[in-house]
Image (cartoon, helix red, strand yellow):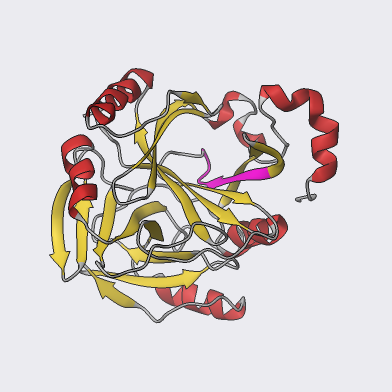
């Protein structure tokens, strides 16, 4: 089962103000801040990572906070909603919490037999808290305000909005090993049985939907998880055989990656579990220190002067 896609590895989105992003995800949503580093291509911009205690694959939400970036727009060719798994009966807690913190949310609804609550982060990124029907035994990170009995467990799903489902579905089923689980109108649910959590991809088919814009408050890319480098390169060969452009293997310090744009327009990444987030700082110190890619260490002083202080 390990020689396959093991669900979602991480999801990366774009934010505006770095401090506002940090405060929302650590204080309001109650995630652990597991890594403060910089964008590989823009070292004067942070790259934040949030997750569970260990930064486990399937819990990792990352951001490029690009300051005054323009607002993105959900539309065709975008990852339009990030779904988090939460314990059953916890949505009332979250509604109260969102009201106290002036967070925009929609009243609970049901999709594919699961109750969910959608809300928006300060940049307009759309997320959902989902009371999953499948038992989720992952250990939640908890804070003084967000205890384990209501806390997020990690990802439940990612939703893609597309003009046409079939080409993307082909990648999911023929290459990634997903199966169509259920359909409700224009909503199609795919899942992999290789893992029990962070394993759902929802596709929405809207033939007339205008193309979305990836900018502030939108998902930059969705990363899928594999066990190691050998399996990563097996998937590279499969995707290349379809005639799709795919990058060489790229070292992202905490995982090794490939990137390609699936036929519907969403940027996909395949990422390894190795080497993990404790490769450059111990578990207890995760997120406390600015960690730079080796090529930027000679410029640390200059970089630090350009970055907003986060505490």
58 to 122, vertically: above or below: above
Q: Is residue 127 above or below residue 31?
A: below
Residue at 72% across, 57% down: 19
**Position of residue 53 measured from the top left corner of the image (x, y, whole percent):** 53, 42
Q: Count up the numbered dots.
A: 0
* Residue 55 vertical position relative to residue 71 in the rendered view, above or below: above
Q: What stretch is highlighted in magenta?
A: 46-54
Q: Position of residue 30 (x, y in %)?
A: 56, 58
What secondary structure is the stretch in magenta mostly built from?
Answer: strand
Residue at 63%, 29% (x, y): give it. 282
Identify which residue, 264 or 153, lies in the foreground.
264
**Percent position (x, y) of residue 74?**
43, 65
Answer with left or right where residue 310 lies relative to residue 114.
right
In this orientation, which residue lies closer to the viewer: 301 or 27? 301
Q: Identify the residue at image location x=40%, y=82%.
A: 107
Direction from residue 139 to residue 98 in the image, left or right: right
Indicate left or right for 163 with 296 as reference: left
Quadrant of the rendering where the N terminus is positioned:
top left
Query: Does residue 229 appear in this view?
Result: yes
Measuring from the top left, give residue 120's x and y in whole percent.
Answer: 51, 70
Query: Which quadrant of the structure image shows residue 248?
Result: top left
Indicate whether residue 48 is drawn in magenta. Answer: yes
Q: Which residue is situated farthest in the top direction here?
A: 230
> Does residue 190 show up magenta in the picture?
no
């Amino acid at each position: 089962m390990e020689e396959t896609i093991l669900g979602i590895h991480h999801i990366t989105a774009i934010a505006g103000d770095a401090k506002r992003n940090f405060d929302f995800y650590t204080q309001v949503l109650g995630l652990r801040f597991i890594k403060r580093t910089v964008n590989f291509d823009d070292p004067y911009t942070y790259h934040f990572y949030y997750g569970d205690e260990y930064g486990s694959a399937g819990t990792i939400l990352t951001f490029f906070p690009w300051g005054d970036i323009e607002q993105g727009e959900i539309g065709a060719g975008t990852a339009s909603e990030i779904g988090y798994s939460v314990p059953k009966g916890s949505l009332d807690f979250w509604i109260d919490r969102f009201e106290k913190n002036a967070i925009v949310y929609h009243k609970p609804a049901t999709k594919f037999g699961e109750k969910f609550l959608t809300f928006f982060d300060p940049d307009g990124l759309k997320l959902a808290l989902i009371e999953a029907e499948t038992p989720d035994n992952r250990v939640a990170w908890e804070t003084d305000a967000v205890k384990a009995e209501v806390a997020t467990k990690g990802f439940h799903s990612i939703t893609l909005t597309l003009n046409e489902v079939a080409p993307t579905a082909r990648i999911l089923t023929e290459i990634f090993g997903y199966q169509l689980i259920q359909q409700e109108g224009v909503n199609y649910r795919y899942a992999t049985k290789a893992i029990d959590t962070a394993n759902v991809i929802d596709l929405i088919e809207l033939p007339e939907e205008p193309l979305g814009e990836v900018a502030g408050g939108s998902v930059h890319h969705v990363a899928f998880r594999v066990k190691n480098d050998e399996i990563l390169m097996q998937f590279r060969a499969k995707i290349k055989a379809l005639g799709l452009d795919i990058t060489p293997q790229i070292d992202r310090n905490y995982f090794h990656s490939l990137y390609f744009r699936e036929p519907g327009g969403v940027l996909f990444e395949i990422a390894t579990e190795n080497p993990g987030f404790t490769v450059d700082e111990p578990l207890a110190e995760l997120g406390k220190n600015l960690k730079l890619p080796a090529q930027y260490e000679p410029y640390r002083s200059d970089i630090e002067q350009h970055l907003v202080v986060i505490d």
